[in-house]
Amino acid sequence: MKASGVLVTHLLGVLVALVGLDNFERAASRSKQSEAKANLKALYWAELAYRQEKDTFTASIPKVGFEPERDNRYRYDLSNETLGNLEDRSTKDIISHLDDTGIAEDTFKFIPWPFAPYVDPPFVTPGPLGHFRASAQADLDGDLTIDQWSIASYDRYTRDGVLIAKAGEPYCDVDDSVQ
């Protein structure tokens, strides 16, 4: 009886450790998602400032002055073009152009991941009555699911009319932290 009690105790210990590891991995993924939320808010405010000055939105990342810190896990984009111009962060020096519509994930530090199609594609509608939606994508855990966040200059609703995100509020389109 005593040996089976020790075995049960060990098995319970292993089970608790596995559950704890799963919770730790989820917490680590959630902390990585804070990068996307903070940078999308910065991009949102940069677009609003640009619109205030120029009376239009733009898809040009350099024109709005959006420049997240190096070591970014996420790809940030204002254009739904699959092969849009992205600021290159694959080398020690950043390579950017005035027509860049996004910022690539920092592959100088992180392993590159395959590009996935946007669930909620980014876009910019120029002009005084224009609007925009920006996107952030990353592979947080090396699986086939790509974490995707977006932010827009307008309130977003489900097809049933339920508010899912107010203007300027980051929204998780695909959550890679709970897979």
Image (cartoon, helix red, strand yellow):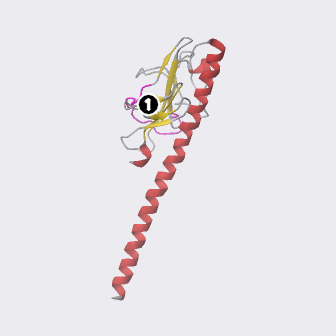
**Three-letter amino acid code at disc 1?**
Tyr
Q: Residue lying farthest front?
A: 161
Q: Where does residue 50 sit, x and y in percent of width and height?
A: 63, 18
Residue 71 visible here: no
Judged left or right of residue 38, residue 162 is left
**In the displayed structure, would residue 33 be above or below residue 97?**
below
**Magenta stretch in the rendered image:** 105-121
Nearest to the observer: residue 160 or residue 119: 160
**22 in the magenta segment:** no
Name the spot of residue 139 as percent of width and height, x first. 44, 40
> Circle 1 sits on which residue?
157
Name above or below for residue 103 compared with residue 5: above
Indicate whether residue 112 is drawn in magenta: yes
92 versus 84 height, above or below: below
Q: From where the camera sits, is residue 44 visible?
A: yes
Callout 1: helix, strand or loop? strand
Give the total number of marks visible in the rendering: 1
Which SS type dominates the magenta stretch?
A: loop
Q: Residue 173, position in %: x, y? A: 43, 36
Q: Quadrant of residue 10?
A: bottom left
